[in-house]
Image (cartoon, rainbow, N blue to C red):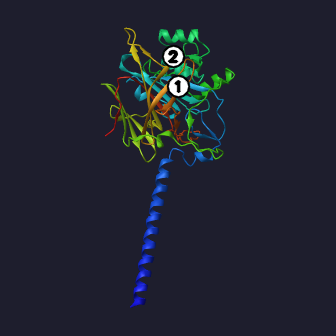
Amino acid sequence: MKKTNDKLVVTISLTLILVCSAILGLILFWDQVTKDAENKAATTANQFYLYQNNLNGAGEDVSTANDPVIAVMVDNHVDARPLQAGIAEARVVYEAPVEGNFTRYMALFSMDDASELVGPVRSARPYFIDWASEYSAFYLHSGGSPAALDMLKNNPASVYDVNEFWNGLYFWRDLKINAPHNLFTNAENWQSLVAEADGVAPAWRGWQFETIRAVDSAVRRPSVLVSSYAVPNGIIIPYNKNYEIVWQYDATSSLFRRLINGERERDASGQEIMASTIIIQRTNIKTIDSEGRKKVTTVGEGEASVISLGRKLDGRWQKSAGGRTFFYNNGGEEVIFAAGPARNASHSDAGGTIWIEVVPLELVVKAVE
């Protein structure tokens, strides 16, 4: 009987050990799955690159830290949306209100980005010039408001002014499309422009991005993974009753899909507009004339939110006169952004755009239910 009991004890002990081992293995497995999911922003391809792009943190095989930034004003009138090109390929996009209850985009590219078509190109506004000056950008536009043109005339060093009125060589009009929604440019044109301008822009500091390079000794993780809350389905930005933006989160790609008034936004080629990070920048926006033109406060500080990897981090933005806009968590630490995916020359891996939504103080941004 004693031997039988001893065998029973051994059997039970072995069974418990196997069960505990299985449970521990399952816990470790799911922990690794969670870590893998959190690190989707730094793609496998990114990890083989020695450099990161200053605009969106994507991996690169050569340094572009000193390359000029190209800023293009892009039409977002309802008649222009089927014609928009290049937005899906931009590294950074600013969206802010203009007159007529519309918004306008400013799309930022690295000089060597291979965009074949960007536009429709539209006119300048002072607040977009202020943001473009943070990058000492080549600023491509077609005319502008009186205040914008005065700003470019009186402070020419802030950006490299490329007004289509005087630089038509770097733009063209598609005569099959009604003006003013028919003006376009591309990478070949702006690369020629940069070459003729001797090509080197003043240095500027990019935002902080998560570590993706093998040569980095210190590991930086995206701030949204450290202190934030989940918005698993995305966010809603109701700019006005006729214009509502939804950024719908796609957990498979870790990117946000853009919808306008319930319809997926696509560019002229049919490519969906996607973003890796959405920034909500709240500021004072006032109508200043009978045309409905806006004054948008760009200097100072205010509330901001960073949405990435299905999570939302609340904090603040700060900008000094002549300086860059930086984003901080509520503890005063500068935000570390998720890195955009590496892209090849054809832009088939585009989608790592940082999209800055500039909204009035009173606008309520909601989570998608």
Amino acid type, callout 2: Ser
Question: Residue 30, can we see it?
Answer: yes
Q: Residue at x 44, y 48 (%)?
A: 252
* Residue 276 position in % (x across, y down): 48, 38
Q: Is residue 331 above or below residue 76?
A: below
Residues tagged 1 and 2 counted as in contact (Cβ below 8 A): no
The amino acid on which the numbered mark 1 sits, given as a three-letter code, is: Thr
Residue 125 percent across, percent down from the top left? 48, 16
Q: Is 347 positioned to the left or the right of 237 in the image? A: right
Q: Circle 2 sits on which residue?
A: 142
Q: Quadrant of residue 232?
A: top left
Kind of element beneath mark 2: loop
Q: Residues within 10 Å of mark 1 (few under 14, many from 20)?
A: some
Q: Is residue 42 left or right of residue 240?
A: right
The front one of 37 and 72 is: 37
Examine the rendered structure and indicate whether residue 341 appears above or below residue 194. Answer: below
Q: Disc 1 versus disc 2: distance between alpha carbons?
A: 25 Å
Tell us which disc is closer to us: 1 or 2: 1
One can see residue 124 in this view: no
| Residue displayed at 39% across by 8% down | 289
Q: Which quarter of the image is occupied by the N terminus? A: bottom left
Q: Percent x, y for residue 74?
A: 47, 24
**From what the image shows, is residue 351 above or below residue 178?**
below
Estimate the x, y position of residue 369 in percent, counting from the top left.
31, 40
Q: Nearer the viewer, residue 303 or 287?
A: 303
SS class of the residue under badge 1?
A: loop
Q: For the view shown, which residue lies furthest in the bottom direction?
A: 1
> 119 or 284: nearer the eye?
284
Q: Up-down: is 134 above or below 32?
A: above
From the image, tell me which residue sits under label 1.
325
First reached walking from the N terminus: tag 1 or tag 2: 2
